[in-house]
Image (cartoon, grey):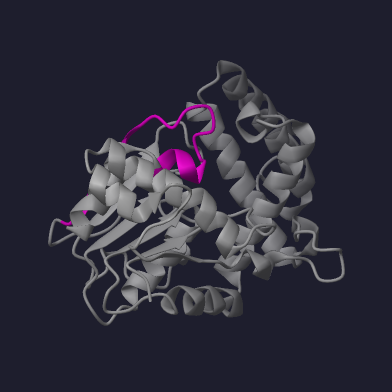
Amino acid sequence: MSRIVLVHGMGQEQESADSLEAAWLPALAGGVRTAGQPDLADRLWRQGRPGDLECRMAFYGDLFLAQGRMGSGQTVDDLTPQQQDLAAALAVEWLRQAEERAPLEEDRDEAYRQLHALDTEAPGRMGVRASGRPVLNALARLRWFAPAGMAFAERFADRSLAQVTRYLTEEAVREEVQERIAAHIGPETLAIVGHSLGSVAVFQAAHRLERKLPLLVTLGSPLGLRTLVYDRLPEDKTVPERVQRWVNLSDRDDLVAAVLDLRKLFADPRGVLNSDWTLNTGAQPHRAQSYLTKPQTGAAIADALG
């Protein structure tokens, strides 16, 4: 059981719990240190190793490896026709987000051109399977998705869309992820932190809790994506009953975080949801470590740990 449970997002199928802990823990300690709690930061990570506060990663990336392909990740082509429809619709939504608020003007212009081209090729069919591959190609042209070049962008967009789609549509996948999260939660758990797709998973895990949880943290969350994520959640659209504080953090330039202020969508009768979209996470706005190093994240963790 862990004091802090960490849950990663999409595109981590080549990682492991150990490698992600080694990347996340120094970043989280840095956020706590920046928030003015150096002694507590040392208890999370000091001199290249974890401290005495137990923090564990609930890893599920291996669920999305393609069997028989030398460990490569699954792609949209591996999905059923119905799932491909959903993946294409998600890709179109990301393009729309890019058109509205991508940090680079050339990305906004490129998203506009790609959306216009898709609508011209298949009028009235935006987001259907027939336009799936062109949508993926359009996403790969955006610099937001291609910090390491076009080939990386195509792989990232393809695999990320496949993973989000499978999590949303396959109960067996969701239940396995939930079991892996629950395995790290115990009476001593004070905080659960979820990034990207992991934020959807931790929201659902929090609804299943039978004891109080001092802190739920969601980073770069797509929970507010209406018809594609939000409307598919089987849970009530409320702050989980056992959660005493929910902190949702988003960078305005993070296109995955479609709705920046979740207070507009989740009922909060106890007033425990804080949704802050003023973060600046730099050139890679969806990167987990960039969120973890921020003082807003560190202050929330420090408060939960006391």
Q: Nearer the viewer, residue 45 or 306?
A: 45
Q: Nearer the viewer, residue 294 or 306?
A: 306
> Horizontal and vertical percent for residue 107?
61, 23
- Locate the N terminus and report the quarter of the image it occupies: bottom left
**Residue at the image point whose x is 47% and y is 43% from the top:** 289
Which residue lies most toward the bottom here? 210
- Locate the C terminus and report the quarter of the image it occupies: bottom left
Which residue lies most toward the top here? 105
> Horizontal and vertical percent for residue 274?
23, 48
> Horizontal and vertical percent for residue 38?
26, 42
The answer, for residue 284, to whether it is visible in the render is: yes
User: Image height check: is 26 above or below 235?
Assistant: above
Report the side of 54 relative to 116 (left or right). left
Tell me which corner region of the image, top left, top right, bottom left or bottom right, holds residue 154: top right
User: Image height check: is 179 above or below 76?
Assistant: below
Which residue lies most toward the left here? 270
Q: Which residues are magenta?
A: 272-292
Report the side of 112 relative to 8 (left or right). right
